[in-house]
Amino acid sequence: MKTLILAITVLISASTYAYSIKAKVLKHKNKQMEQVTFKSEGLKLVGNLYYPADYKKGESYPAIVVSGSWTTVKEQMAGLYAERFAREGFITLAFDFRNYGQSEGEPRFWENPDMKVQDIKNAVSFLETLPEVDNNKIGAFAVCAGSMYSLMAAAEDSRIKAVVTAASWLQDAEAVKLFYGGEEGVQTKIAAARKAKETYAKEGVVEYIETISTSNPAAAMYGPYDYYLNPERGGIKEWSNNKFAVMSWEDWLTLDPMPYATKLNAPTLMIHSDGCVLPQYTKNFFQKIATDNKQLDWIETELDSPMQQFNFYDQEAEVGLAVKKGAAWFKAKL
């Protein structure tokens, strides 16, 4: 039996936008990456913009918004993939979503899917302001939960011309019951989230739990997951391993991205395997995508679910494969 239990808590219309764009260059363009800021719903978001090695001022390039897993910051998998796709000739943007990293937003460490979807749309709006970006060639790449947010954004925003996902986390009400203690477990977390929101509204106090723990089952991620625990991988100083806002549970557990598939018309490539999390859900979503301009690449593996999921975060075999396939897709579809 696949070790699905290991997945518990792990990865766990375009016509109108309330965005305000104000770009600010914080570093000179004498490097392949510069730090930038832009506004999303009035909040300043901070991102890293990567350029192709052969970048020439005055020319325009296709661009990709890159997103990582839930709770993560731009220095983790998003930045890794952004840098790698830049090598393939794209301008790429990895940024901190609101409430995380260097970006503004309160409460801190609040995983709010609706906000993240809107932030992706506003990242596209920012890219459109750059003279070096071809506005007709903007795509989105994401891994894990970022795939869920990017697919939702693309379904609503026709400015996103192509999508690629790797090791996507896609859920519905039944999936979260499997991973969070059945109906009772889910409702208990939702109730705790609502109470935490009330406390924050009345007292301004945010209730936190650990983001990951090998000893505390109440942590957002509970288990020996090396990527998040290893400072040489994802356990970096820019990321918090001990602050997950309890109020996040309601927003996370009530999210169902599956209906968005029928509204998704952008050419879409999905890369997944039986060794990644929730493989059947990726298949289900793919089957319902509205366009026929889609492709599902299923990778052979001997790893049990979800252990290959983590390999897509930073291991060369999986990252290299995703970048190779993704770059080819974007070059053909953008």
Image: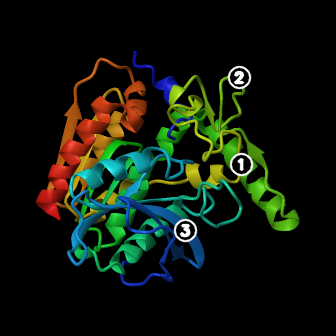
Callouts 2 and 3 close, C-beta under 8 Å = no
For the N terminus, give its image quadrant.
top left
For the C terminus, give its image quadrant.
bottom left
According to the image, label 1 marks what residue?
246
* Residue type, numbered disc 1: Val
Residue at 86 percent across and 66 percent down: it is 202
According to the image, label 3 marks what residue?
45
Residue at 66 percent across and 24 percent down: it is 214
Answer above or below: position of 139 versus 238: below
| Residue 277 appears in the rendering | no
Q: SS of the residue at dot 2?
A: loop
**Which one is nearer the viewer's eye here, 244 or 103?**
103
Q: SS of the residue at dot 1?
A: loop
According to the image, label 2 marks what residue?
215
**Which one is nearer the viewer's eye here, 177 or 75?**
75
Answer above or below: position of 254 versus 188: below
Q: Residues within 10 Å of mark 3 (few under 14, many from 20)?
A: many
How many numbered marks appear? 3
Q: Image check: 132 left or right of 144?
A: left
Answer above or below: position of 230 versus 40: above
Question: Mark 1 or 2 closer to N-term?
Answer: 2
